[in-house]
Image (spheres, rainbow, N blue to C red):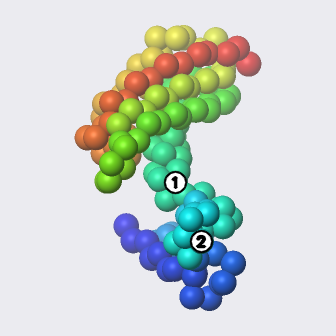
Amino acid sequence: MECTVNWTGALNTRSNMGFVAETGSGHTLMMDGAPDAAKPENGGQNLAPRPMELLLAGAGGCTAYDVVLILKRGRHDVRGCSVKLSADRAEADPKVFTTINMHFTVTGKSLPSLAVERAIAMSHDKYCSASVMLGKTAQITTSFEVLEA
């Protein structure tokens, strides 16, 4: 897996801390720093997500993918899956995630709660590389609700 990240600050005077990432699969995404009123030259322009927000989003995408796949493989009629993540970070550098809560909302036809709970646990414990990595510094908790389609 590869990714190239380029600073756009030299090309774009609007954002001093903007970056463009190009993934190995050929996709691009923007990142930007938070504005810094005290030192504008060190801040971004709030034009794109922060890098740490992308880490959190990546973990959400990774685990939601697993949950849907596990439920489909179990021949469950899953129709929707969303996960809301909330996280706290350390006060001092490096400001790693210290806690992460993932709340899943899974929609389907006659989905058993036990199957959803099992899929989330399997993702968290075995399959989601992002969650396993982030779990090295953060206490990760999960919760879920099942909605009838």
Q: Position of residue 42 (x, y in %)?
A: 52, 72
Q: Residue at x 46, y 11 (%)?
A: 114
Q: Nearer the viewer, residue 7 or 23?
A: 7
Q: Residue at x 64, y 75 (%)?
A: 15
Q: Residue furthest bottom?
A: 11
For this view, does 30 lie left or right of residue 6?
right
Q: Residue at x 44, y 23 (%)?
A: 142
Q: Position of residue 135 (x, y in %)?
A: 31, 37
Nearer mark to the viewer, of 2 and 1: 2
- Determine if residue 148 is in view: yes
Q: Residue furthest front?
A: 38
Disc sitting over residue 54 in the figure: 1
Q: Position of residue 58 (x, y in %)?
A: 49, 49
Residue type at the position of mark 1:
Leu
Would you place residue 52 above or below residue 142 in this image? below
Q: Nearer the viewer, residue 127 or 75?
A: 127
Residue type at the position of mark 2:
Pro
Element type at marker 1? helix
**Labelled pair 2, 1 in contact (Cβ < 8 Å):** no
Q: From the image, which quarter does the N terminus lie in? A: bottom left
Q: Residue furthest right?
A: 149
Give me the C-alpha separation between circle 2 and circle 1.
23 Å
The residue that label 2 is drawn on is 40
Q: From the image, which quarter does the C terminus lie in? A: top right
